[in-house]
Image (spheres, rainbow, N blue to C red):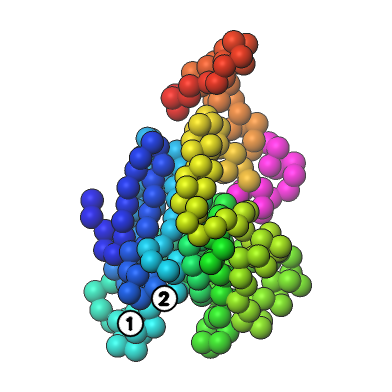
Amino acid sequence: MEYHDLLVETVDSICTITLNRPERLNAISGPMLRGFSQALQAADADAEVRAIIITGAGRGFCAGLDLKDFQTGVGPGTGAGTTRFSLQDSPPVVLHRTDKPVVCALNGAAAGYGMDLALGCDIRISSDQGKLAAVAVRRNVLPESGGTWLLPRLVGWAKAAEVAFMGKVLDAEESLRLGLVNKVVPHDDLMTEARAWAAEIASCAPSAVQATKRMMRLGMDETFEANVHHVYLQLLPLFRSEDFREGVKAFGERRQPAFTGR
């Protein structure tokens, strides 16, 4: 399937989705919103995919929603144009519901919507040229795509308030210090590092990885006792799986397991 201004490629169980509008610093247009959601949903449904990488083409990760669309009256939510805007099918919501682990390869600036998109990923590997730009309040808008929910959970209320209320731009090292990215690498090493992390994830039992992500996500909004109960219900089918038997057998034979997802 072809997607508007997106490159989607699956190799060795890793689906890489590249925002491909470098002349606009990968600013998100209406058609890109729809295509990006569809690409995420397709990867999540594909049993061959065990991890997803999101990155940008050129020198920017994502400059946010394309303000030129709004100036011409065809941006999402303006009521014009051919793109129907559905919150439940928007990339941040789809990304949040995706069971496959998602690695953000932050190749440049992620501003506004782009920052929310990066924060919505499970793991963030940043180039030394990566930036997180909380510039929404400098455009008389707010972080509309998950940022107000994600940022306080990642760095705590006070630091989130400092970053968001002041419209701060965080370079790669500051993002690392705050725990907003997992690792900073030289720019030319970014995709190699991101693929290495994704490959390590893909080598683990996919059903267990996805169940773990679901339970971590659910646990953010429920009590400890409720989460323990839900984890137990997830554990029962894993015990009955071929991959569980393979994991136990590989442990006994002192070798790496070969998981199939069954």
* Residue 230 quadrant: top right
> Is 11 situated left or right of 134 in this image?
left
Q: Residue at x 33, y 74 (%)?
A: 23
Q: Which mark is residue 69?
A: 1
> Is 217 situated left or right of 63 in this image?
right
**What segment carries the magenta color?**
217-229
In the image, residue 194 sits, relative to residue 33, either above or below, namely above
Q: Residue at x 70, y 63 (%)?
A: 178
Q: Is residue 86 visible?
A: no
Q: Amino acid at mark 1?
A: Asp
Q: Is 122 in front, or is 194?
A: 194
Q: Is 204 in front, or is 261?
A: 204
Most common secondary structure along the magenta stretch: helix
* Residue 167 quadrant: bottom right
Q: Which mark is residue 39?
A: none
Kindly state the secondary structure of the residue where label 2 is placed.
Answer: loop
Residue 119 lies, in percent from the top left, at 56, 62
Q: Residue at x 53, y 38 (%)?
A: 201
Residue 137 lies, in percent from the top left, at 58, 84
Residue underneath mark 2 = 65
Q: Residue at x 45, y 66 (%)?
A: 61
Check contact, mark 1 vs mark 2: CB within 8 A. yes
Kindly state the secondary structure of the residue where label 1 is placed.
Answer: helix
Residue 128 lies, in percent from the top left, at 56, 63
